[in-house]
Image: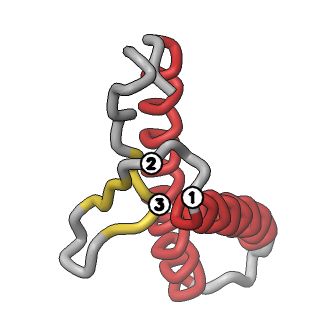
Amino acid sequence: MTDNAIPPARLLPWASPEGKPCYLLTDGSGRLSRAADAVESVQLGMADDLLDHAADMLADEQVTTGQLRFLLARMSEALTDVRRIAESRGARLLAYANGGR
């Protein structure tokens, strides 16, 4: 890639209201890039918290089916977020390794 080439689009850590992926063309230094970085950080932190909560609930023999279903729903949401973050970061690493920004 040359210095004048357009960098690859960044997959953002949120979806459109229709559930479609959102992308950003950026050099990685703008306000929206920083907002996306902050959202990713929050999403990863929430996933960590859910893993800790899951460990506690699985150790509790009094946990109800409803509680486990609720936890599983939140974990599914978190896994979707984490997968999107991994896809976005992987694409940016690949672009960087191939001479991109």
Q: What is the three-letter code of the residue carrying label 1?
A: Gly
Residue in the image at 42% along x and 31% along y: 91
Q: What is the three-letter code of the residue carrying label 2?
A: Thr
Q: Residues within 10 Å of mark 1 (few under 14, many from 20)?
A: few
Q: Is residue 7 left or right of residue 47?
A: left
Q: Among all residues in the image, which is located at the extreme top?
A: 98
Place of residue 53 in the rendered image (x, y in percent of width and height, measured from the top left): 75, 71
CB under 8 Å between discs 2 and 1: yes
Front residue of 25 and 93: 25
The answer to whether residue 23 shows anywhere in this view is yes
- Quote the CA–CA distance across marks 2 and 1: 7 Å
Q: Which residue is mark 1?
A: 30
Q: Is residue 6 left or right of residue 43?
A: left
Q: Is residue 48 left or right of residue 28?
A: right
In the picture, the disc for residue 13 is 3
In the picture, the disc for residue 26 is 2
Secondary structure beneath dot 2 equals loop
